[in-house]
Image (cartoon, rainbow, N blue to C red):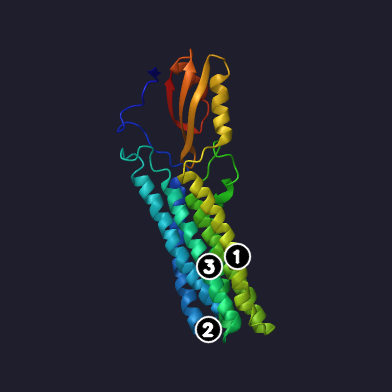
Amino acid sequence: MSTAPQPPHPCEHPRDYLGHAHDANARRTAWVVALTAAMMVAEIVAGYLTGSMALLADGFHMATHAGALGVAALAYRFARKHARNPRYSFGTGKVGDLAGFASALVLAIFAGAIALESARRLADPGQVAFVEAIWVAVLGLAVNLVSAWLLGGGHGHAHEPHHGHGHDNNLRAAYFHVLADALTSVLAIAALLAGRYLGWAWLDPAVGILGAIVIARWSWGLMRDTADMLLDVADPALAADVRSRVEASGDARVEDLHIWRIGPQAQAAMLTVAGTATAAQLRERLVTIAAIKHLTIERR
């Protein structure tokens, strides 16, 4: 049994698998944290003063999201700071996914809390200063739209092949938090307008339940995708591609294959190969797969 040439000493091996947009995404997220925190304070104060459950819920919603977005910003900073630290064998590319999973849990908890409070308010809607609350809710929606623009729609890679492009789940989590904020702002505005002009006070808590359902669905999708990354779920298409390239010439056979993501746009592959092909020949066959940034080949 022989083993292909080993990579350089850990201290010399580049481990920056963070993706080309990492630093830009970090700056965008920091701006969104500042905007969200400012609007959070405004909505909570206005919610208490006007008596609007929808507005107060939106304010506390923004508070949880400000915290989650802060975690996202810290994750970007930590990942960049330790990207080449030899203690992290495959770099810090998964830090963003860890933060994304935590954000998904926050979204799920918030969805449950707002659904329970909204159900309670269906029985006792209370008194609301509709006009003042509407203006604050509109301002909150404007902040959410600006935040979504700053994040640049970074969620857009969610359905692209993992081995071709990859996506930043940390940015995706931040984007979903902003979308959830925007949704609750829209629902709050609709409920306040209906209460002000139609006398439908019950709509204020009813739309809160609807919003909680939508947010819970976003949370589940994000939790599923980040869990796949953290649990090293393999991409079947990439595995099939690697196997076919190795075995195409008939002088090698893949006996064992492991593929996993180590960053938003980076994959690692470890395979055991039997046959007459040399390690150099095998590497040449796989070098054109741009997504594979770390390759280990064992020959039998």
Q: Report the amino acid beneath label 1.
A: Ile
Q: Quadrant of the C terminus?
A: top left
Q: Earlier in the sequence, mark 1 or mark 2?
A: 2
- Residue under pointer 1: 213
Crowd band around label 2 with a 10 angstrom C-alpha radius: few (<14), some (14–19), many (20+): some
Discs 1/2, front:
1
Q: CA distance from mark 3 to mark 1?
A: 9 Å
Q: CA distance from mark 2 to mark 3?
A: 22 Å
Q: Report the amino acid beneath label 3.
A: Gly
- Toward which corner of the image does residue 219 lie, by quadrant? bottom right
Question: What residue occupies the far right of the structure in this picture?
Answer: 198
Question: What residue occupies the far bottom of the structure in this picture?
Answer: 127
Q: Report the amino acid beneath label 2.
A: Gly
- Determine whether 156 is above or below 203 in the image: above
- Determine whether 94 is above or below 202 in the image: above
Give the residue displayed 31% in from the left and 32% down from the top: 10
Q: How many marks?
A: 3
Q: Earlier in the sequence, mark 3 or mark 1?
A: 3
- Toward which corner of the image does residue 240 lie, by quadrant? top right
Callouts 2 and 3 close, C-beta under 8 Å: no
The front one of 93 and 25 is: 93
Q: Quadrant of the N terminus?
A: top left
The front one of 258 and 46 is: 258
Crowd band around label 1 with a 10 angstrom C-alpha radius: few (<14), some (14–19), many (20+): some
Q: CA distance from mark 1 to mark 2?
A: 24 Å
Q: Earlier in the sequence, mark 2 or mark 3?
A: 2
**What mark, if any, has residue 112 been given in the picture?**
3
Kind of element beneath mark 3: helix
Residue 215 pos. (x, y %): 57, 62
The front one of 244 and 167 is: 244
